Image (cartoon, grey):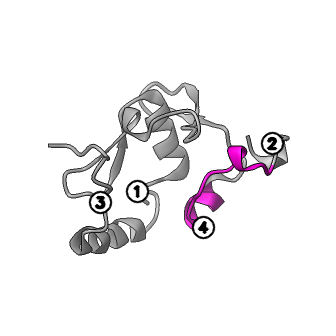
């Protein structure tokens, strides 16, 4: 839970995030699943497994939600920069894939 909504700054309430994701998370705890238009709690890395809710595209440049939680989280954070004129995160991911740094081996990918 975000500190601004009464959460603590104890380590078990924190999650490592890049500046971009931290700014987009703000104090949101829910998002809209674009498939059902329902308000859904966002993915919680302390309580849920990433691979249960997300999958990478085969080329490793985009994340897709595979559940309402995953879709609402992708939508809320615009994880693929699809609402921006320049998809800078996809460009960065291409470099990371080429260098062999991304995506993590344990993360599922589309076939």
Instruction: Name the residue located 40 percent from the left edge and 56 percent from the top edge.
Output: 80
Q: Is mark 2 on a helix, strand or loop?
A: loop
Dot 1 or dot 4: first in sequence order is 4
Residue 90 in the image: above or below residue 14? below
Q: Nearer the viewer, residue 44 or 72?
A: 44
How far across and down, in percent of the image, does residue 11 sit?
A: 71, 50
Dot 2 or dot 1: first in sequence order is 2
Instruction: Name the residue located 46 percent from the left edge and 45 percent from the top edge.
Output: 74
Disc 4 target residue? 19
- Residue 28: numbered disc: none
Q: Distance between the residues labelled 4 and 3?
A: 19 Å
Disc 2 target residue? 7
Label 3: few (<14), some (14–19) or many (≥20) C-alpha neighbours in 10 Å: some
How far across and down, in percent of the image, does residue 111 sit?
A: 14, 43
Disc 1 target residue? 80
Magenta residues, as a range?
A: 9-24
Label 2: few (<14), some (14–19) or many (≥20) C-alpha neighbours in 10 Å: few
Q: Is mark 4 on a helix, strand or loop?
A: helix
Residue 44: within the magenta?
A: no
Q: How far apart are marks 3 and 2 (CA)?
A: 33 Å
In terms of image quadrants, where is residue 70? Answer: top left
Disc 3 target residue? 61
Q: Is mark 1 on a helix, strand or loop?
A: loop
Dot 3 or dot 1: first in sequence order is 3
How far across and down, in percent of the image, does residue 84 sit?
A: 46, 64
Q: Are marks 3 and 1 in contact (CB under 8 Å)?
A: yes
Residue 48 in the image: above or below residue 107? above
How far across and down, in percent of the image, does residue 66 sit?
A: 35, 33
Instruction: Name the residue located 72 percent from the left edge and 48 percent from the top edge.
Output: 27
Instruction: Name the residue located 35 percent from the left edge and 43 percent from the top edge.
Output: 64
Dot 4 or dot 3: first in sequence order is 4
Q: Distance between the residues labelled 2 and 1?
A: 28 Å
């Amino acid at each position: 839970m975000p500190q601004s909504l009464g959460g603590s700054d104890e380590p078990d309430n924190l999650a490592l995030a890049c500046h971009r994701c931290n700014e987009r998370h703000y104090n949101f705890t829910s998002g809209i699943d674009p498939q059902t238009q329902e308000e859904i709690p966002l993915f919680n890395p302390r309580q849920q497994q990433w691979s249960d809710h997300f999958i990478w595209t085969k080329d490793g440049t985009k994340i897709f939600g595979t559940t309402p939680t995953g879709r609402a989280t992708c939508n809320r954070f615009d994880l693929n920069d699809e609402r921006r004129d320049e998809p800078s995160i996809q460009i960065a991911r291409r470099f990371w894939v080429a260098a062999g740094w991304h995506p993590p081996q344990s993360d599922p990918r589309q076939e």
